[in-house]
Image (cartoon, rainbow, N blue to C red):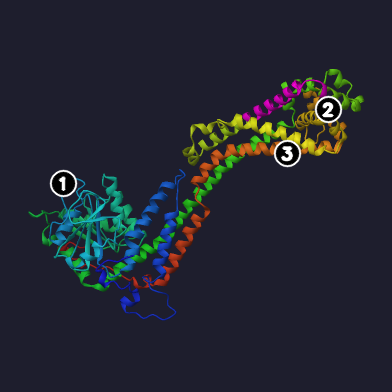
Amino acid sequence: MTTHGDPATRSGAPTVAARTGSSETDETPPGPTGDGLPAALTGLRAAIGAARFPLALPSAEPARHTGRALTDQLDDYLLPRLARLDAPLLVVVGGSTGAGKSTLVNSLVQARVSAAGVLRPTTRSPVLVCNPADAAWFRQGELLPGLTRTNEPSEDPGTLHLVTAPALAPGLAFLDAPDIDSVVDANRALAGQLLAAADLWLFVTTAARYADAVPWELLRTARSRGASIAMVLDRVPPEAADEIAAHLSEMLAAQELGAAPLFVLPETWVDGQGLLPDRVTAPLGGWFARLAADAEARAAVVRQTLDGALASLHPTVEALADAADEQVAAADALDDRVRAAYQGAHRTVAEGMKDGRLLRGEVLARWQEFVGTGEFFRTLEARIGRLRDRLVAAVTGRPATPATELRNAIESQLVTLLRGVAAEAAEHTYTAWKAHPAGAALLEPPLAHASADLPERAERLVRDWQRAVLELVREEGGDRRFVARTAAYAVNATGLAVMIAVFASTAFIPTGLEVATGAGTTVAAQAVLQAIFGDQAVRTLAAKARGDLLERVRALLDEEAARYLARTDAARPGPEVAAGLRRAAARVEVARHRSGLADQAGPALPTPTPTPEDGTR
């Protein structure tokens, strides 16, 4: 990173110890401008940049806002300030609409450098005013690098108007920020960004608006990050000055901000240049003059605010990591709902192979037509041996139409089942996601139904499975004289019997329901196969064919589920995001303690002398 000032004078940033004259031993870690703290902050910035919060959770938008604010603070203040601790003290003047910030800045520097008027918002882009000797510090762009430097007033909030004022002492700069409660969103956001880049926050409020909520929210933020703060209570009626000042002091004390210097400016007029009378601004101007003249006091302010900002990083980043964990947990929860729906669909198919539903209707009729008449079933038990020969003769001597029709009936029944379970799983998943805030944001209408090409894929699955069953029969019965004698058509007939048998009970022993449903169909299939292959071979064939079908069905349903899972995969931050944030924050905290900033940051701001006539409290 480059630093402020003349490039010819940059020779690396000295440590705090070197700057303050304290000694270091070989065992003492580097100061804050050594490799430790800047490197840790750079690592933290990278971890924050890698964090994403795409799922629509209540914590997502606050986390995104926090991430942006942290990145801005690192870029705008922490890293540039660590690089050059001896840069001029930056005082950001903030406050509510119409509080008189610009008028106050103009009066303090004794020049009309910032536009003031009755129209709101007046300050559309920030104005930074400094002594001409300090201008080089701010032209380089390391501080607030996202703002384009300009020498002319601008209505573009992305610019920083640089102005020099000889009346302002060297070592001090004022930045007139947009209103913190501006009606323009960009102005409010910029005001917050600028305040986070301040060494000293000068809050300007009025007798009429000092209790407004927005300033106090920002003041609590300032307190939480240990920032140096001074308060200006402007436009106070003289007769109510003591009462209002006392009430504001009580409010500051209640927010643990009682140590903040408070300056009370009475209601008054402005001169032809729009400047306040010297007698009104003298107490505040004198206080800043003393601060500008005391290098050690300025350094103490910088160290206090810098250490406070560093100390606030750890809890803030921890909250960011918690939000990243919530993203992962939400994505996992959505995935669980998908898997539950499609696993349920797979179970339905598995149950359909056991409960006889696939043996009803067309499949039963075509099977009966294929193997024989009702008399065939009545004589089955006594004529198992002859049944085998009858089946072989029948299937080798009659046209292939009954076999084709049986195969088509099996395919149709299976495809119907697969289409039904896929549609039901899609509907259940859609409903479950719709009830989840993150899931609802990911949904699109087509997800409520199975894929448009599911019927074709289901048909292809069944046909592929039927061919695999025939191949299985060839492999299992390859050494059987039966298969050798009857050649391919016997394999086809036996394969069809295996397909029928797959839809029976897992143990391949027909239950009463199966016999009743199939009118003896299952018994016929079992008897035929046992006659050809034997009991153990029957069980092996059935188990393999059933397992193969279920695996194919699982693959099909997994493809359907992937339509949902792909959306969570695209949105889910990796578990390493939260872990990376926590590790980076921990490294910063260790480096902060080793830097010694906290030890060097004592009472920073000079205490104004409280005299009734000079307007201080």
Q: Nearer the viewer, residue 465 or 39?
A: 465
Rendering coords of residue 350 (x, y %): 70, 35
Q: Quadrant of residue 532?
A: top right
Secondary structure, mark 2, is helix
- Quadrant including the C terminus: bottom left
| Vertical position of residue 536 compared to residue 381: above or below | below
Q: Is residue 10 magenta?
A: no
How far apart are the two marked residues, 3 and 1, measured between alpha carbons? 81 Å
Q: Amino acid at mark 2?
A: Val
Q: Amino acid at mark 1?
A: Val
The residue wearing badge 1 is: 118
Secondary structure, mark 1, is loop
| Vertical position of residue 32 compared to residue 96: above or below | below
Q: Nearer the viewer, residue 164 or 498?
A: 498
**Residue drawn at the location 51% of the way across and 36% of the way down:** 434
Which segment is the magenta one? 396-420
The answer to which of marks 3 and 2 sits earlier in the sequence is: 2
Rendering coords of residue 147 (x, y %): 27, 55
Rendering coords of residue 124 (x, y %): 22, 49
**Residue drawn at the location 60% of the way across and 34% of the way down:** 425
The residue wearing badge 3 is: 547
Q: Is the Cβ of the residue at disc 1 closer than 8 Å to that at disc 2?
A: no
Secondary structure, mark 3, is helix
